[in-house]
Amino acid sequence: MKIILIWICITITQGFSFGQDSTRVKFKIMTQPTQFLSNDFPLIFEKVFKRSALGLTIAYRPSTQNSGKIKSYGYGLAGIYWYQNFTNDLYNAVTVGVNSKYFIVKKYNLFIEAHLFYRYWWFNNKYAEFDNMEGYRFKATRTERQNVYGLKILFGNSFQFKTKSKIKPIIDLYCGFGVRYKTWKFETFNGTIRDDYYTYKKETGNYWMPTLQGGLKIGIGM
């Protein structure tokens, strides 16, 4: 992570000093290094046109825990179980998204971007324990499914190194807002009597949530 952060700082500095018109590249392959912190590994492929770009995002998050206690990392809304997927090591996840980008001011690489995505979270028959301040708790075998549908509207700037090579390091900085819709289905087996899950319990639900967005993408243009 230290190497990645150093590379990002150098790229930003060089981008401001030697920024070119990033629409001169035809293709981009990028990632979002901040997602690595939550064990999520995205790849973004973009085809660049004169003043626009179309892209495809795919990502995979592997599970790193086969059973055990799930930590609660917040209080209030932040402590709600189905808000904490990225800190729940029992979960696997796959993401697929498409984006459309338009360069508002071509000379300075300013852009507006719409990003539509779907993320699927799951794990099967894992023994798990959870207890938060809001009173949601379980100690049982669980099978879980969550579906997330999201839309982001982003505003940003794209920078690239001034190099003689046809392959150019690129960084996108962006911020914006979005909305997402989530559904979930939890099935609990062989729970403790304390939690009333000693036979079987099925939970389903859904909600809408607005979001604020901000981050960076790093990669190469060709």
Image: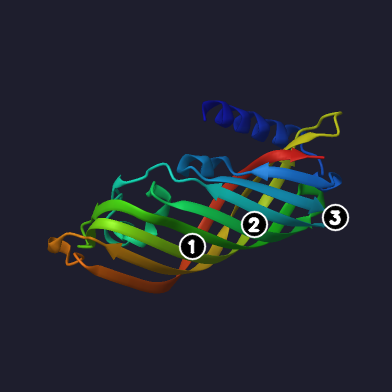
- Is 100 displayed left or right of 75 in the figure? right
Q: Mark 1 points at which residue?
A: 211
Q: Which residue is drawn at 55% across and 54% down?
A: 94
Residue 76 position within the rendered picture, expressed as x and y whole percent measured from the top left: 27, 61
CB-based contact (under 8 Å), mark 3 and mark 2: no
Relative to 189, does residue 44 appear above or below in the rendering? Answer: above
Secondary structure under badge 1? strand
Q: Which of 117 and 120 is in front in this view?
A: 120
Residue 19 position within the rendered picture, expressed as x and y whole percent measured from the top left: 77, 38
N-terminal label among 1 and 2: 2
Q: Mark 3 points at which residue?
A: 49
Q: Name the residue under label 2.
A: 155
Amino acid carrying mark 1 in the image: Thr
Secondary structure under badge 3? loop
* Colour mapping: rainbow
CB-based contact (under 8 Å), mark 1 and mark 3: no
Res. 143 image quadrant: bottom left
Q: In which quarter of the image is the C terminus?
A: top right
- Is 157 displayed left or right of 126 in the figure? right
